[in-house]
Image (spheres, helix red, strand yellow):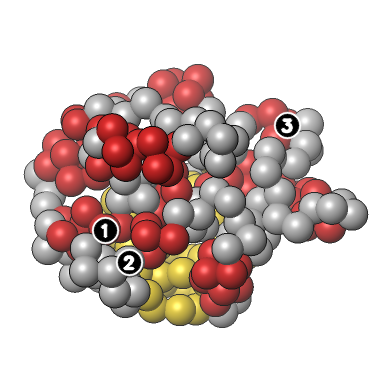
C-alpha cells in the first residue's frame, strides 16, 4: 500500500497520495470483483482497518476535514483508492491531478486504475482540480513532472522548516535500486516499444539532478527498508 503523510505548511496541509480503498479489500464481494486473478494481475494487497487513511490522520491529531490539498501523484488503485473514503469523511480539499493522468485513467488503458476510485458514493465524478505541467502548490512545495510509470506521474519537492528538502518520488522511483542503479520501475505506461521506459529513466535522472542541485533527500515510495529507517521525528504515520 502506498500513502504519504501530510506536509503542513504556513498555507495549509497537503496530502500526497491516499493509499488503497479499504472496502475493496475487506468486503469479499468487492474484493472478488476488483482483485479477481482472472482479470487483475496485481492481487489484493494486505491492508488493515488501522491503515485506512482517516486512521493515519487521526494518529497525527487530524481529521480529513483538516486537509487543504490532496495531491495525487498518479491514479493507480494503491495511490488514489482512498479518495472516496476521504470524501465521505468530510474532506473538502482540492484534489490535484494532471490532465494527462486523468485522461489516461478514464480511457481504461491503464489496468491499475479502478474507475470507481474516481467517483463518489453516488457514482458522480470526484471534483478534481486538473493541472498541466509543473507548478508551485505553495512556497516551498513544488510539483515535479516525472512521467513514465504513468502518463502524468508527478513527484513533489518539499522545503522543510529544518534540515534538507525532501523529494517524494512517488512511483517514479518506488525502490532505492531504481535510483541507485537507474532502472525503471515496474509497470510502465505504453511501453510496447520502450517509450515508457525511456520516459521513466529520464524522470529518475531528473529527480537525481534536482536532489543534487537543491541538496534534497530522495524518498522512494514503496521501499519498506527505507521507510522503516526514517527517524520518528519526520512525523509520518507508521
Q: Quadrant of residue 122?
A: bottom left
Where residue 68 appears, as percent x and y from the top left, is 23, 67
Left or right for 161, reference 172: left
Residue 224 position (above or below residue 194): above
Where residue 195 appears, as percent x and y from the top left, is 84, 57
> From mark 1 to mark 2, how far is it between C-alphas?
7 Å
Left or right for 17, reference 64: right
Residue 21 position (above or below residue 70): above
Residue 231 position (above or below residue 218): above
| Residue located farthest toward the right when viewing the structure as drawn | 193
Left or right for 41, reference 81: right
Whether residue 223 is visible: yes
Q: Which residue is depicted at the point 64% across and 61% down?
A: 109
The crowd level at tag 1 (other Cα within 10 Å; few <14, some 14-19, many 20+) is: some
Residue 73 position (above or below residue 229): below
Where residue 134 appears, as percent x and y from the top left, is 57, 73
Q: Quadrant of residue 84?
A: bottom left
Badge 3 is on which residue? 180
Where residue 155 appears, as percent x and y from the top left, is 54, 56
Task: Compare residues 184 and 203 and report the one nearer the observer.
Answer: 184
Please state which of the two labelled residues, at mark 2 or mark 3, is closer to the viewer: 2
> From mark 3 to mark 1, how far is it between C-alphas?
35 Å
Q: Earlier in the sequence, mark 1 or mark 2?
A: 1
Q: Secondary structure at mark 2?
A: loop
Q: Which residue is depicted at the point 44% across and 21% down?
A: 229
Q: Which mark is residue 84?
A: 1
Q: Earlier in the sequence, mark 3 or mark 1?
A: 1
Badge 2 is on which residue? 119
Q: Secondary structure at mark 3?
A: helix
Amino acid at each position: 500500500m502506498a500513502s504519504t503523510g501530510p506536509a503542513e505548511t504556513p498555507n495549509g496541509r497537503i496530502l500526497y497520495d491516499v493509499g488503497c480503498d479499504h472496502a475493496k479489500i475487506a468486503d469479499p464481494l468487492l474484493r472478488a470483483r476488483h482483485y479477481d486473478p482472472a482479470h487483475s494481475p496485481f492481487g489484493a494487497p494486505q491492508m488493515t482497518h488501522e491503515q485506512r487513511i482517516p486512521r493515519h490522520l487521526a494518529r497525527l491529531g487530524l481529521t480529513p476535514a483538516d486537509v487543504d490539498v490532496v495531491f495525487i501523484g498518479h491514479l493507480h488503485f494503491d495511490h488514489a483508492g482512498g479518495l472516496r473514503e476521504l470524501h465521505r469523511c468530510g474532506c473538502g480539499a482540492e484534489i490535484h491531478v494532471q490532465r494527462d493522468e486523468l485522461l489516461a485513467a478514464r480511457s481504461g488503458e491503464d489496468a491499475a486504475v479502478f474507475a470507481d476510485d474516481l467517483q463518489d458514493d453516488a457514482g458522480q465524478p470526484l471534483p478534481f482540480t486538473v493541472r498541466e505541467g509543473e507548478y508551485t502548490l505553495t512556497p516551498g512545495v513544488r510539483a515535479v513532472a516525472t512521467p513514465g510509470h504513468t502518463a502524468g506521474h508527478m513527484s513533489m519537492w518539499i522545503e522543510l522548516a529544518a534540515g534538507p528538502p525532501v523529494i517524494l518520488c512517488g512511483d517514479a522511483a518506488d525502490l532505492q535500486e531504481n535510483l541507485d542503479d537507474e532502472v525503471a520501475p515496474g509497470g510502465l505506461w505504453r511501453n510496447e516499444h520502450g517509450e515508457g521506459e525511456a520516459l521513466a529513466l529520464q524522470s529518475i535522472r531528473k529527480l537525481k539532478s534536482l536532489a543534487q542541485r537543491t541538496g534534497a533527500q530522495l524518498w522512494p515510495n514503496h521501499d519498506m527498508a527505507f521507510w522503516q529507517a526514517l527517524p520518528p521525528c519526520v512525523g509520518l504515520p507508521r
